[in-house]
Amino acid sequence: MHCRKCREKAVIGLPRHNAAFCKPCFNEFVHDQVARAIKSERMFAPQDRILVAVSGGKDSLALWDILLKLGYRADALYVDLGIGTYSTKSREKAERFAETVGKPCGATLLIHTVQEEEGAGIRELADLIHRPTCSTCGTIKRYQFNRVAVERDYDVMATGHNLDDEAARLLGNVLHWQEEYLDKQAPTLPASLEGFAKKVKPLYRLAERELAAYAVLNRIDYIVEECPMAKGSKMLLYKEVLNRLETESPGTKQAFYWGFLERQTKARPAPASMAEKDQAVLHPCMTCGQPTTADICSYCKMMARAKAGAPH
Ligand code: AMP
Ligand code: FES
Ligand code: ZN
């Protein structure tokens, strides 16, 4: 196998692009895909301050690495959920990366510890409010990402969602015809009103396998285990199904998700009218001031229920 660009020995084959690359040309390919995503989806400008949500996993650490190498001003946020050794280990990975790669570039890692700020770890909170751990976790992470980005004046917040994540989520949303979620599946969500950070997914053009290869080739030390709470989740099942299809016909995932985005762009209302629609229904939460459609946001409701359920 030879590199498509320079004819040196290839280190990775990319069936969906009918190509193979050596290490330097693969890195260039990855950086190029991210640069294309940033440009075509108008994610951010060179002077913008970016907050990357890093979990200690390959995708988000690779994202932070790529943005710094492309010369962007990117800090990171790690949310410590208090899930036993999984959290301890993933936090160590994020901290080490921040020290070795972030710091020399002048970038910092912010840490939010759920146990300290909310008084209990994620599993205990989920028990108190009788909700599945993963959905409690999702609410807390979304809330903290937004809150930190807004309070610290970042222009945009970025997550490490890749092509596999987005295709699996799309499959789930289509299988259940969750149209309201389909609207929110774009790689760029505008800051529709004050208090809502702009959110972007610069890795949506890259597959999970490509990001794993990028991390390994560039010696990014990441946590390989998945969150123990995700075992048996529907998302993992959808990913497996899509991977089977991808093996049979390379390019299926990309055709599915990118095809959806093309159709959505045609059908999508202009960002201005979407922002107007959001503004009409959103107002500050009476407890914390974050934007919400109800009087009290779902995060504050959750915390109130957890407090009421906690032993006195
Ligand atoms: P997941 O939902 O675990 O697939 O994660 C999707 C993205 O959310 C990751 O790529 C990260 O950008 C972000 N993320 C997940 N968990 C955390 C965490 N504990 N702290 C900060 N960011 C996270
Ligand atoms: Fe939130 Fe696993 S990452 S429950
Ligand atoms: Zn609130």
Image: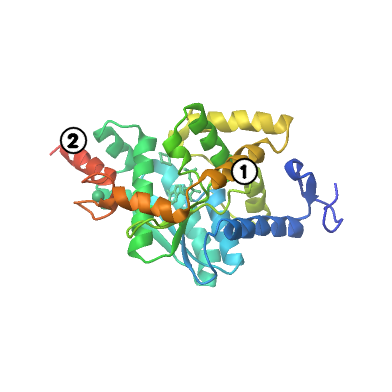
- Image position of 193 with respect to 186: above or below: below
- Image position of 273 with respect to 307: above or below: below
Left or right, residue 269 beside residue 255: left
Front residue of 227 and 187: 187
- Image position of 137 with respect to 130: above or below: below
CB atoms of marks 1 and 2 within 8 Å: no
Disc 1 from disc 2: Cα separation: 44 Å
| Element marked by disc 1 | helix
Front residue of 111 and 252: 252
Question: Is residue 52 in sight in this rendering?
Answer: no
Front residue of 9 and 207: 207
Residue 64: image x %, image y %?
Answer: 54, 59
Residue under numbered circle 2: 309
The residue depicted at 29 percent of the width and 52 percent of the height is: 291
Residue under numbered circle 1: 258
- Disc assigned to residue 171: none
Q: Which residue lies furthest to the left in this view?
A: 312
The residue depicted at 83 percent of the width and 53 percent of the height is: 4
Quadrant in the picture for residue 61: bottom right
Left or right, residue 33 beside residue 195: right
Residue 241: image x %, image y %?
Answer: 61, 28
Q: Which of marks 1 and 2 is nearer the N terminus?
A: 1
Neighbor class of circle 2 (other Cα within 10 Å; few <14, some 14-19, many 20+) is some
Left or right, residue 248 beside residue 280: right
Left or right, residue 8 beside residue 163: right
What's the residue type where badge 2 is placed? Answer: Gly
Q: Does the residue labelled 2 lie within 8 Å of ligand 3?
A: no
Residue 72: image x %, image y %?
Answer: 55, 68
In front: label 1 or label 2: 1
